[in-house]
Amino acid sequence: MNQMRVKQLTMPKPSEFVPSKTVRGLERTNFKNYIDDKHAAMVMFYDPDCHHCHQSKPHFMKVAKTLSDRHRGFGTVDCSAEPELCKTEGVEAFPTFKLYVGGKYINTFSQPAHAPNMIKFVENAPKPMENPKPWPINPPDRSLYEDYKD
């Protein structure tokens, strides 16, 4: 009998680091599902002993409170508790704010945490592709390119 191994997933709980109803505490068991479920998700990777992380909290909380809806999500990852997840996501300094669109990493917010700039950063996120069109099966008509030959 072939036994199927079921991957145990946990639903994200409110963040313990950023006390807000709109910010979720993420870990390896729910990270991928959470970012996949949102059109855009901004994630704050932090270390609880980091002074700059504590200074960034009110800015991140304001961004989440301002922009959070069913299509946008905001989460935190405690890198002291989830070092492998942070390594996988390429986090090397704290805090690190990464933006994901449709579950894919798009960009890192590289400025000091300041709510108005962070809000613009998330608002300017590209829209996720819904039902991308496949490449044409037939090759293009090469006669269209005759004028461009050497």
Image (cartoon, helix red, strand yellow):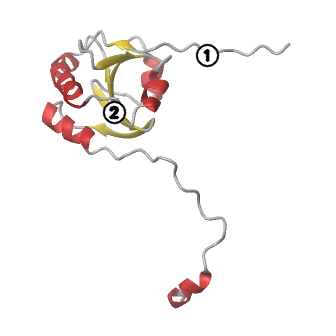
Residue 101's spot in the image, x, y percent? 39, 39
Q: Nearer the viewer, residue 85 or 7?
A: 7
Question: Residue 131 vs residue 105: left or right?
Answer: right
Q: Residue lying furthest front in this view?
A: 70
Task: Say whether residue 146 is left or right of residue 108.
Answer: right
Q: Quadrant of residue 80?
A: top left
The N terminus, quarter of image: top right
Can you name the residue that lies furthest to the right here? 1
**Is residue 78 in sight in this rendering?**
no
Q: Helix or strand or loop: what does disc 2 sit on?
A: strand
Mark 2 residue crowding within 10 angstroms, few (<14) / some (14–19) / many (20+): many
Residue in front for this viewpoint, 43 or 24: 24
Query: Which residue type carries mark 1?
Result: Lys
Residue 119 in picture, x, y percent from top left: 20, 36
Asked if residue 92 shows in the view, the reply is yes
State which quadrant residue 120 falls in: top left
From the viewer's perspective, is residue 112 above or below residue 8?
A: below
Count of labels shown? 2
Comparing labels 1 and 2, the label whose residue is closer to the camera: 1
Q: Which mark is residue 98?
A: 2
Q: Residue at x 16, y 38 (%)?
A: 117
- Of mark 1 and mark 2, the one earlier in the sequence is 1
- CB contact under 8 Å: marks 1 and 2: no
Residue beneath the point at 52% across and 48% down: 131
**Which residue is found at the position 34% from the left and 33% from the top?**
98
Q: Amino acid at mark 2?
A: Lys
Alpha carbons under labels 1 and 2: distance apart: 25 Å
Circle 1 — which element?
A: loop
Percent from the top left, x then y, of residue 129? 45, 47
The x, y position of residue 67, in whole percent, is 23, 31
In this figure, which residue is indicated by the disc labeled 1?
A: 7
